[in-house]
Amino acid sequence: MDALTSQYSVLLEKQQQLNNVIPSRLDRLKEVLQEAKKNLENDPSNWKESLVLMQQKSKAQNFQKELKDYSGAVSKYGKAIEKTFKQDPTIASDPTAFSGKEHILDRAVALHFIRQGQFQLSESFIKEAGMANDEEIGSSATELKFKFKKMYDIIQELEEGKTESAIKWASEHHEELNKRGSSLAFQLHRLRFIKLLETSNMEALYYGRTHFDEFADRHLPEIRRLMTSLIYHNKLSQSPYADLISEQDWLGIRNTFQRDFCALLNMSADSPLYISVLVGTMALPTIIKVVTIMNTRRTEWSQQDELPVEIPLPDDLRFHSVFACPVSKEQATALNPPMMMPCGHVICKESLTRLSKSSRNSARFKCPYCPSESSAAQAVQVYF
Amino acid sequence: MNKIKPEQLLELEQPFIKVPNEQLKKTLRNQTKYLEKEISNINDKIEDCVKKAKADRITSSQAMAIIDELLVRLRKLGRKLDDIKKEEQLYTTRTKIRLEHLKNTSQVAPTDKEAFNRWSKLRLDRVLVDYMLRKGFNDTARKMAEDSEISEMVDVELFAQSARIEEALKQHSCSECIQWCSDNRNSLKKLKSTLEFNLRLQEYIELVRLGKKTEAIQYVQKYLSSWSESHLRQLEQAMALLAFPKDTLCEPYKSLYDSRRWKKLIDQFKADNFALCCLTSQPLLSITLQAGLSALKTPQCQQHEDKNLNCPVCDTSTLGALAENLPLSHHVNSSIVCRLSGKKIDENNPPMLLPNGRVYSLQALEEMASKNNGYITCPRTGDTFELVETRKLYIS
């Protein structure tokens, strides 16, 4: 990367030199011609000599050296690019993968814009993509826009430190939130309490009395802390309760609110397009490397319906449990579920049947991980 | 996020840097051509003038007229060079901004989540703008580039230029595209492109379609005969076309008359254009989505009871439908996520088996039991058990 930038600065230098030289030499050429013209007018007797002079001077105005330097720098820069970026991302993808499904892709993009709150972009996109007649998008788009506008309005207010509309929304939906086990309402009240604490002791006290009652069964310890922090009204930052004032909490509450709002709408917390592109960006370098190696060695990947390489995902991007049988290293599927033997070890069904068939004693076989024996009938299917 | 190496991300950015470089090279070529041609022309004219003067074939006033003419040419050259310089400046600034961006990317600490999120959002916007430009949604693309302040990281003008030519081809006019081919003749030859031949062939077909047979034959003699060694078979077929009327049912002449050839011409132009400019042949969005959806896809995504609200592939109406034919993700190691708490199951949080065959993490079960007098309820089946009835599992 550094080599590239330094090569580019050299290019800029040469370019600058060329740019400095061009106007001045062109002007000089002009002067030479005009001088000759004047000589012809003033001194008609020697006009042939003036012409010869003009010819000599104009020959001197050329740009060979600077042009050569500049093109040399440009080609060196091009070579540096070749060295730094060796991979063409296209080899990792199949051009026909989405053929016939372009309208689905467009739909996904339009939904993404609406989810991100970029409503004008979504309208303009729907118009240009000709999706205004698509029923799926048409009616649900306006509905979704309305809902997400509400969500973004509330988030905007939370950014400004105002919790009223969020609290109102939480109380309107408190049944569903409780079912999900969300503590959003309490956290909102808590933040409001802390904010009031900064100004008036008594107001915070009254607020706590009015609102904390319904949360007593689930959040008693925290409520205790909050009410005790009233003592330190003006000196919170030097008290043991200094951790109550935290910017991170406000950031966290916006995330929690967004998550709960979307969950109640039966939608994912983040735009699915964003997550897929994020994972794709992380996965591409590995896939490209593997495909390049496979191409040079002319090998084929044996399992056609799986990627040739494992892509390690960070924990918050794992949405499903994956069980890989320790014996066969294959993924468990509905046809090949994980089975637990009485000793507690889990392997997939196919490995189990293979083990029981190949053992000398037809009914019993040994677990590959511990010396205990079992029979195929004793294995239980587990559900993760 | 801490599994990303910044250098790996750089590998994806080949077209990012190559495109303005190609544009820069083009302006350099233009500039060199003009400068050298004009200056040598001017010098030649001067030499000619001097020779004639020495041979007494022109008068002094004629010489002055020649000088005036040369001055005019010089002025024109200056203006032309100014225009080229402006264009060059655009590409130079753009390259500088892009190099800056890449340098910042490579210096992002892998654990800095905020910075990584910002970078990912930016990349998503870039990928979306690229997609929209390729499909011709220019208004949305421009608006989005302005909103996200990524105007220098996307190539709006490049697509605008090619949009003109595509529009002309849609209107069944080959001239703009032929002009483009002659401008880029050398590079197209390196690609071994057959675009120019196909364009000429199409113009010939249109002449035959209108019944202008003599003109068609003259056209072939003028433009298509130079291709006779490489495309003999096709030329022969084309000449035979003269014998068939435009609504013939006889193959292969029926397909020669077919108006869908125009669509194929547009596609070929697009492909050659992208190859010349070093853009990827498919939209970045397709490439990235394929990789991402495959990496996320598990066998459970197709099954209804295992649907996870947050998993993009489980959503069958949009991304799930796209992922239908893609390969599954490959895993050699198990990674189990507890359905109750959503937390990862590992040595610190081992899996526990309930008597009904369902498995959850120990921490989630303990929490549930502590709130319910030691009893746990399986969320999937509703059965109740006591915590002590569970047993530990070993999955690796």
Image (cartoon, grey):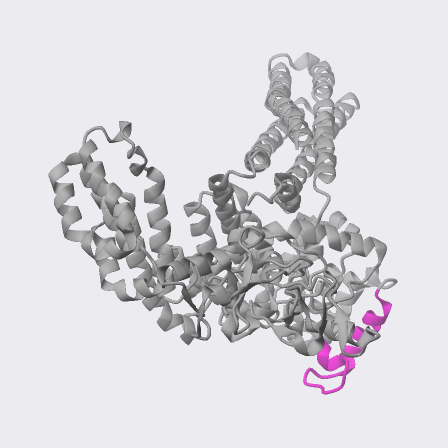
Q: Which percent across, then down, holds residue B240?
A: 81, 78
Q: Residue A177 or A303: which is nearer the viewer?
A: A177
Majority SS type along the magenta span: helix
Q: Where does the magenta region start and end? A: B231-256
- Is residue B210 visible in the rendered structure shown here? no
Residue for point 31% across, 62% down: A177
User: Is residue A6 shown above or below A354?
Assistant: above
User: Is residue B130 shown above or below A381?
Assistant: above
User: Is residue B308 shown above or below A83?
Assistant: below
Q: Which percent across, then down, holds residue B391?
A: 55, 64
Residue for point 43% across, 61% down: A268
Q: Which percent across, then down, holds residue B32?
A: 69, 34
Q: Is residue A146 left or right of residue B356?
A: left
Q: Which percent across, then down, holds residue B31?
A: 66, 35
Residue for point 60% across, 13% down: A42
Question: Is A49 in the magenta?
Answer: no
Q: Residue A61 or A278: which is nearer the viewer?
A: A278
Q: Is residue A42 left or right of residue A127?
A: right
Which image quadrant: the N terminus of chain A? Answer: top right
Q: Quadrant of residue B106?
A: top right
Determine the residue located farthest toward the bottom in the rendered image. Answer: B249
- Is residue A35 visible in the rendered structure shown here? yes
Question: Is B237 in the magenta?
Answer: yes
Q: Residue B76 or B255: which is nearer the viewer?
A: B255
Q: Quadrant of residue B89?
A: top right
Q: Quadrant of residue A201?
A: top left
User: Is residue B59 shown above or below B4?
Assistant: above
